[in-house]
Image (tube, rainbow, N blue to C red):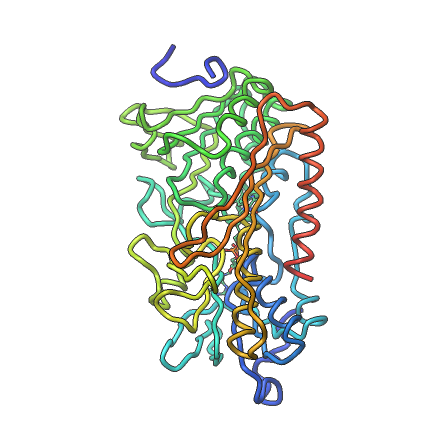
Amino acid sequence: MTRRRFLASTAAASTALWASPLLGQGRPRVVVIGGGAGGATAARYIAKDSKGAIDVTLVEPTRRYYSCFFSNLYLGGFREFESLGHTYGTLAAAYGINVVHDWAVSVDRDKKTVGLAGGGSLAYDRLVLSPGIDFRPGSVRGWDLSQQNRMPHAYKAGSQTQLLKAQVAAMRQGGVYCMVAPPNPFRCPPGPYERISMVAHTLKQSNPTAKILIVDPKAKFSKQGLFEDGWQRLYPGMIERVGPDFGGDKVEVRPGSMEVVIDGEVNKVDVCNVIPAQQAGSIAATAGITNKAGWVPVVPHTMQSRADGNIHVLGDASQQGDMPKSGFSANSQAKVCAMAVRGALTSSKVFPARFSNTCWSLIGTDDGVKVGASYKATDEKIAKTDGFISKTGESAEQRKATYEESIGWYAGISKDIFG
Ligand SMILES: Cc1cc2nc3c(=O)[nH]c(=O)nc-3n(C[C@H](O)[C@H](O)[C@H](O)COP(=O)(O)OP(=O)(O)OC[C@H]3O[C@@H](n4cnc5c(N)ncnc54)[C@H](O)[C@@H]3O)c2cc1C
């Protein structure tokens, strides 16, 4: 036995409507920054439920959003890349949302305006921020964004996900895939471990003598018992995890020589997936509403920033309490936010906030597991009220049904976000 733990052995393009002086006159204005799971949902619900009474502008740089959710299934060969892509045409055409494809680069909270990289400026009565995450500089020694093509994170979906898949396919026989896992809190708690499962599934077919090494600063991780059980059943001898008790929190990477140094011990690897520590998307810090940890504390009843009541913050960027950072959570928070924004701007009725989340993960073919919960708003935090989790030893039928449920969820939430 080495000093490590061998789990398997032991365990529409913007039509610049926003610039038109004819539109938006007299109507309260909402600007949404970020057209992902949180922002696009909020924009859609505010526009839809206010029936045109609120002028909604959505600012998002990309014309096609690739979801991180189900991107691991693409790595495992269960999903086509293009099935992860979504566009903004329906939000613009069917809901009258002004979609602006640009970066928000500044927020003037006194004047209540957002500056755009392209030079324009948007005035708001309420601002909704859902910019997702950025990586904390310096969190993995030897890695910064300039190394992302050699050691991809694939934690913002799109070309990074494609690159990681290509690197796995090109691995030499018997090579080593290494993942440097992130510390808490981070986007999608089961995400790294579902990814390990999907990479193992691929390698088992194309490269069965390959090894997978997880370097993890955390002692425990989401759905750990379920993943470890699945890895033993499906990928015995392939996956090794180094936790903090064996130096998983003391890691350095050397992209030039493809080495990973764990507590002084040099490991040569063939693919290295570095998932750094995270914080709110940088526009939140630019707006001056983040805390020391880099997240935005929010009022759970309305998702308003605790520092500025004119700004609502959703999804991964928010620090809200018990909910995991997930697409499901962001979508759920966006509906609470939309209701609060309408209440504030059009005096529509506001009901007590309720939230829910489920995180499905695929471990192998038809082998799906899930964890989920319901939540309510308290003055202090979004608080869990009850929850559920899959069990080890479930029948094959049950696992298949869970996987099929997740496929239905992806189709449903995509429609709920993008229309
Ligand atoms: C591998 C992986 C698997 C996952 N699997 C699941 C899953 O199965 N289920 C699940 O629920 N969740 C899953 N997630 C988590 C989910 O992807 C995120 O929690 C979710 O996308 C968060 O939504 P968001 O709105 O906060 O951010 P995002 O969806 O990332 O959207 C943020 C948007 O803001 C834009 N933006 C950023 N800065 C600016 C700016 N300055 N100006 C304008 N626009 C800006 C970005 O371009 C982006 O489109 C997974 C994540 C990963 C990485």
Residue 73 horizontal/vertical position (percent): 63, 38
Find residue 14 and report its image quarter: bottom right
Q: Residue at x 48, y 81 (%)?
A: 123
Observer-nearest residue: 410 or 170?
A: 410
Observer-nearest residue: 79 or 389?
A: 389
Location of the N terminus (image quadrant): top left
Reply above or below: 249 against 66.
Answer: above
Left or right: 207 with respect to 284? right
Reply above or below: 188 against 46.
Answer: above
Reply above or below: 131 against 311.
Answer: above
Q: Residue at x 66, y 60 (%)?
A: 418
Observer-nearest residue: 189 or 242?
A: 189
Location of the C terminus (image quadrant): bottom right
Residue at the limit of the structure toward the left, as seen here: 264
Residue 105 horizontal/vertical position (percent): 42, 69
Residue 8 horizontal/vertical position (percent): 50, 17
Residue 25 horizontal/vertical position (percent): 58, 88
Left or right: 182 with respect to 350? left
Q: Residue at x 47, y 62 (%)?
A: 301
